[in-house]
Image (cartoon, rainbow, N blue to C red):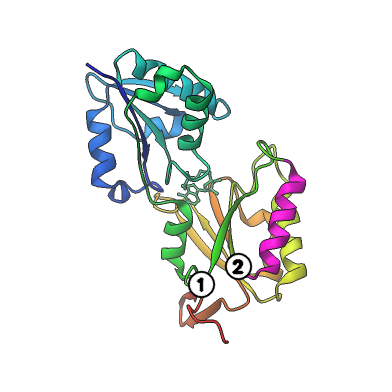
Amino acid sequence: MTGSVTVVGLGPGDPRYLTPAAAAALDAAQDLVGYVPYVARVPERPGLVRHASDNRVEVDRARHALELAAAGRRVAVVSGGDPGVFAMAAAVFEALEAGDPAWRALPITVEPGITAMLAAAARAGAPLGGDFCAISLSDNLKPWEVITARLSAVLVADLVVALYNPISRARPWQLGAALALAAEHRAPDTPVILARAVGRPDETIRVLPLAEAGAAEADMATLVMIGASATRLIPREGQAPFVYTPRSVAR
Ligand code: SAH
């Protein structure tokens, strides 16, 4: 039998946010490859071999998946959220490009998932109603100067900015620096959404004015979204405000 690789997005956490197509790919898999917590999200069953690995070995992990498929196995590579957003799909294609040319004949598919930015936006209201962008604040794979240059450019362009990988034990100061940069371009009352563990039992969503949003409010399970100049709040009695960005921009 011919092997295959399907790169599967598991969504933000709640199993109801896993697409039926992604669930079918997981059901069909013989081998499950991914970062430990994502592999752990897929229930064990007889006949499913699990290959859980550490966070920092994405391309090695992707190569392993391609080797398994080339040996005839049906492999599912799993990522949280969407596998194409700061995740395993790019690592699989990087390994494919650099690897054995015979691998290019393998059936390789990507099954999308709901990315953290979209899940967080839905909880807050409609902050992505206008133009927006997503930036990973992790400087493990790119220089910090590139991150700040891109962030400055999109702040000048007045886009809503979703920040992935805002902070970690090894990267404690980057989010504070990014918020300070945002404060140079945006008003102090600009809404900042801090969406933590969306779709998981410990989910918290907070909306703070930019002037009060600090790095202490986030951890590595948090998606941080900085509003554009048009992003607005609809306050509600006793409840969190809605946050939205109107679709129209004055001519
Ligand atoms: N492929 C994933 C993103 C991987 S990068 C996706 O599409 O969502 C990891 C970062 O994603 C985390 O540091 C955090 O910023 C964000 N993230 C992932 N899952 C999240 C969740 N359930 N709630 C909030 N943020 C999340």
Q: In this view, does 90 lie to the left or right of 65?
A: right
What amino acid is labelled 2 in the image? Leu
Give the left or right position of residue 147, taking residue 13 as reference. Answer: right
Q: In this view, does 166 lie above or below 35?
A: below
Instruction: Classify mark 2 as within 8 Å of ligand 1 or not, answering yes or no.
Output: no
Majority secondary structure in the magenta region: helix
129 and 12: which is toward the camera: 129
Residue at screen point 23% across, 24% down:
45
Which numbered marker is on residue 159?
A: 2
The N terminus: image quadrant: top left
Label 1 amino acid?
Answer: Gly
Residue 212 is one of the magenta-drawn residues:
no
SS state under label 2: loop
The CB of the residue at mark 1 lies under 8 Å from ligand 1: no
Q: Is residue 33 above or below residue 222?
A: above
**Count of labels in the image:** 2
33 shown above or below 111: above
Magenta includes 147? yes
Q: Which residue is drawn at 32% across and 51% down?
A: 17
Whether residue 176 is visible here, answered yes or no, is no
What is the x, y in percent for residue 170? 69, 37
Residues in magenta, as a range: 143-159
Counting residues from the start of the chain, the first of labels 1 and 2 encountered is 1
Point out residue 86 in the picture as x, y percentages from the top left corner: 53, 43
- Circles 1, 2 touching at the beta carbon (< 8 Å): yes
Quarter residue 50 falls in: top left
Closer to us: 216 or 128: 128
Q: Is residue 1 left or right of residue 206?
A: left
Residue with the mark numbered 1: 130
